[in-house]
Image (spheres, grey):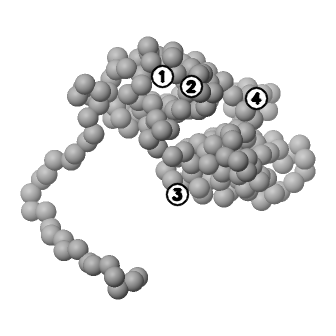
């Protein structure tokens, strides 16, 4: 490292200390009754993690692990969203189904091969979110068997936020799990095995 940087002094803690946490809306702890907007990851404040459609899926998974996320935005060369890919996509049945379909190896699968294309994405409208509660978001995610929901600003026609069950769980200090529902015959067969 360059000699223009200084090493800071440090000390040991000798007693229990409190941990600072950011305040929630109106200073309240996040609950199911809290305004839904409090649990949304605001993309005007947090840069989303993106990937190329041509990235091998193992590298996409490594990227998710590195950034501590379970979903990546798949973007074109102009950073326009063309889809999303989740950890469930990469680690679930999709790669196996794709390998069987096109007769390839796992290492040959790219993000574009198993991602959810933008034409198959359902999004929440910011105007609806602004009048909802955290419990409404969790009920919605459970109803559609998804771990994530994208929020779109209809006026600006751009994705402005993300809901994640993992993020909401961390904010509430309670674990919420959304069971994956089998949507293909192969997935039903796999679940029954």
Of the two numbered discs 2 and 4 on the same chain, state the one appearing first in sequence: 4
Residue 92 seen in render: no
- Give the image location of residue 125, x and y in percent: 56, 20
The reply to whether the C-beta atoms of the residues labelled 3 and 1 are less than 8 Å apart is no
SS of the residue under disc 2:
strand
Left or right position of 2 against 185: left
Which residue is pictured at 40% across the width and 34% down the height?
169
Which residue is pictured at 48% across the width and 38% down the height?
44
SS of the residue under disc 1:
helix
- Give the image location of residue 63, x and y in percent: 59, 55
Which residue is pictured at 59% across the width and 32% down the height?
159
Q: Which one is closest to the eye, mark 4 or mark 3?
A: 4
The reply to whether the C-beta atoms of the residues labelled 2 and 3 are less than 8 Å apart is no
- Which class describes the residues within 10 Å of circle 3: few (<14), some (14-19), or many (20+)? few
Q: CA distance from mark 4 to mark 3?
A: 28 Å
Most distant residue in the left direction: 15
């Amino acid at each position: 490292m360059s000699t223009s940087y200084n090493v800071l002094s440090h000390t040991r803690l000798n007693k229990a200390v409190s941990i600072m946490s950011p305040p929630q809306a109106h200073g309240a702890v996040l609950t199911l009754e809290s305004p839904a907007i409090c649990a949304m990851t605001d993309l005007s404040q947090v840069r989303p993690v993106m990937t190329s459609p041509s990235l091998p899926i193992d590298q996409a998974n490594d990227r998710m692990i590195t950034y501590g996320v379970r979903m990546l935005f798949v973007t074109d060369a102009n950073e326009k969203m063309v889809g999303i890919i989740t950890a469930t996509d990469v680690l679930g049945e999709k790669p196996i189904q794709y390998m069987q379909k096109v007769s390839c190896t796992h290492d040959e699968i790219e993000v574009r091969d198993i991602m959810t294309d933008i034409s198959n994405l359902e999004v929440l409208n910011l105007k609806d979110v602004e009048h909802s509660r955290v419990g409404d978001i969790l009920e919605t995610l459970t109803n559609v068997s998804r771990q994530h929901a994208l929020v779109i600003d209809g006026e600006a026609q751009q994705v402005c936020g993300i809901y994640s069950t993992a993020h909401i769980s961390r904010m509430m200090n309670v674990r919420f799990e959304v069971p994956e529902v089998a949507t293909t015959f192969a997935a039903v067969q796999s679940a029954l095995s």
